[in-house]
Image (cartoon, grey):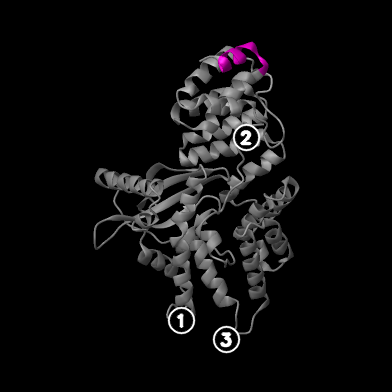
Amino acid sequence: MPIFLYSFRKYLFGSFLLISILSFSQNTEKKRVKDTLSNTLANDLKVKALGDSLQNAIINYESEKFLTYFSNEEFIERLKKLNTDADYEDNFVKGLLSGVLKGFNAFPNRIISELKADGYYDFVNYRYDEYEQTYFILFRLYSQSGLNYHDYRIRKNPDTGDFEFTDIYIYLTGEDFSQTLGRIITFTMNSSNSKGKTLKGFQDFMQLEKAIKANQVGNPQRGYYIMEKIKGDISKDKFFLILKSMMAANLGDEEYLKSLEELFAIHGDDPTIFLNKIDYYLLKGMNYEAVECVEKLKKITEDDFLNYSKANIAYMDENYQVALDNYKYIVDNYEGFFDAQSSYLAILTVLNRNDEAIDYLNTLVEEYDKEDLIEYLEELDENNENVFEDFIKTEAYKTWKTAE
């Protein structure tokens, strides 16, 4: 069917997949690095300006401009404070840090590639965190691959006075980027002995690298099956299991559900994985529980765009009036978002409110080419179905179609 029914299957993009090494989880909460920035109106305005600048850089495809707002030095300092046991004078560690930064520098290009494929990257809001003593800027990535949020940690450059970001909390992984990369360093240092002989953990690590590379070149099936064979400690890592589930999502519902159940069996009490639970509940037909997770996410992010997700779940649940109301909210508040516009139109036709559907088509003609709309309404989707099948047979539609 042509209506886009939203799935929360996530795309762990960019810098994570460009870096071909991961590692074990460790509890870094006690080592959290605090920034100090006062909560003032003047700082509010500067933080908002930074958010606007980041969004403009992405919209204008200016990856180098985007990176001028990133503090390489502070990011490395955060890594060092989270990993005090590593020898940062060691040439190998220096090379590893250099590779980390190269991977991160590809981050904006991956976002831009999503935008070029009709995705969106939007500055949602900002907030001040009293515990962290600094500001955060929240961005939403929405694409055909799914939904994710990025929470940028902000600081004031002590030399220039400019506001910049030093780290990003990735909602899908449930941790700061520095924490994920910090485990790379810890694992690498612990995986080889002083004579350079390879340990079993490092062998698993190298297999994971092969899996990631397979996924990068468009072969998630091979990547998934390589990960299936890894049985060491790394196979229990949250990040490992999330990455594995994303590969499984490309193989079918059965494999995807299996991978999610494996994740929850080990990390079911982790509050940061409720994003993954949304997919699980949808696959199990537990739509009420899925909506509860969406509501939790909406409360955390304060992002009204999640009404679109609620609408899609209501549609799958055949709760058409709730779906219609939520689609209408998105249509009214997110101009030019065709996924919501087409879904709103589809629900009108499902409810046989054909006169309203014609009126809405007349408004869409002001925004889109009529011939393109006709083609969209009459074509079959990838499942050889068409949600507008009955509607396009009505006299009302035929009259609209032929009208000048």
In percent of width and height, residue 160 lies at 24, 60
Q: Quadrant of the N terminus?
A: top right
The answer to whether 398 is drawn above or below residue 62 in the figure is above
Q: Earlier in the sequence, mark 1 or mark 2?
A: 2
- Range shown magenta: 393-402
Q: Residue at x 58, y 67 (%)?
A: 23
Spatial CA distance of label 1 from label 2 is 50 Å
Q: Residues within 10 Å of mark 3 (few under 14, many from 20)?
A: few
The label on residue 5 is 2
The stretch drawn in magenta includes residue 174: no
The label on residue 74 is none
Return the residue found at the far bottom: 195
* Closer to viewer: mark 1 or mark 2: 2
Residue that badge 3 annotates: 194
Q: Residue at x 63, y 84 (%)?
A: 197
Residue that badge 1 annotates: 91
Mark 1 and mark 2 in contact? Answer it, CB < 8 Å: no
Q: Main secondary structure of the magenta part?
A: helix
Is residue 6 in view?
A: yes
Mark 3 and mark 2 in contact? Answer it, CB < 8 Å: no
In percent of width and height, residue 147 lies at 54, 44
Q: Identity of the amino acid at label 2?
A: Leu
Q: Residues within 10 Å of mark 1 (few under 14, many from 20)?
A: few
Q: Residue at x 49, y 29 (%)?
A: 330
Q: Identity of the amino acid at label 1?
A: Asn
Foreground pick, 38 / 313: 313
Q: Is residue 255 left or right of residue 41?
A: right
